Amino acid sequence: NRKFIFVGIASDDFVKQNTNYIFMSGIEDDLLSLLYGKVNYVVSTSTDEGLCFPVKDAVHHCTKVLALNIPVFDELYKNNDLVTLFENEQNMLKYIENI
């Protein structure tokens, strides 16, 4: 049974009502760190990001990350086996539905 944390803003049709999904916006770093050990994936739907500490911290905790392929993520994580980058939300959702 897979668990996900969604970090950032997503369209309503992207975030489905499912007990496997936890959607949080503006989450405090301390709480997010506690959740890393309880999920299989951290999902970042951000389209405009600085360093995106939740993604950085997830990688630090060896938690898999699904994220949109924005320039900063491409630069930092394109060769990281823990991070899967997607060109759009639809491709990400298809991937999530098949996990």
Image (tube, rainbow, N blue to C red):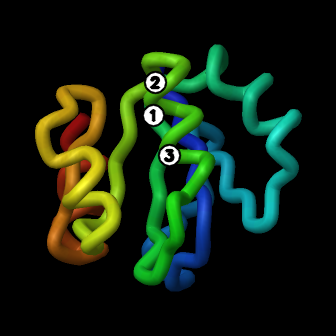
The C terminus sits in image quarter: top left
Disc sitting over residue 4 in the figure: none
Q: Mark 1 and mark 2: span between their CA atoms?
A: 6 Å
- Name the element at disc 1: strand
Q: Residue at x 81, y 55 (%)?
A: 27
- Graded by Cα atoms within 10 Å as few (under 14), some (14 to 19) or many (20 or more), the crowding at tag 3 reads many
Disc 3 versus disc 1: nearer the observer: 3
What residue is at 45 percent from the left and 34 percent from the top?
A: 41
Up the image or down, 46 lies above or below 5; here it is below
Q: Which mark is residue 63?
A: 2
Q: Position of residue 58 (x, y in %)?
A: 53, 32
Q: How many marks?
A: 3
**Under tag 3, what secondary structure?**
helix
Distance of mark 3 from mark 1, alpha carbons?
10 Å
In this rendering, is residue 73 above or below 4?
below
Residue 68 appears at what percent x and percent y? 30, 66
Labels 3 and 2 touching (C-beta < 8 A): no
- CA gap, disc 3 to disc 2? 9 Å
Mark 3 or mark 2, which has the lower sequence index?
3
Type of residue at label 1?
Answer: Tyr
Q: Nearer the viewer, mark 1 or mark 2?
A: 2
Circles 3 and 1 in contact, beta carbons < 8 Å: no
In the drawing, does residue 74 fall left or right of residue 37? left
Residue type highlighted by circle 2? Thr
Picture coordinates of residue 1, whole percent (x, y): 46, 20
- Residue sitting nearer the eye, 39 or 33: 33
Judging from the image, what secondary structure is the residue with disc 2 in?
Answer: loop
Please name the residue shown 33% across and 66% down the image.
72
Mark number for residue 41?
1
Q: Indicate which disc residue 55 carries.
A: 3
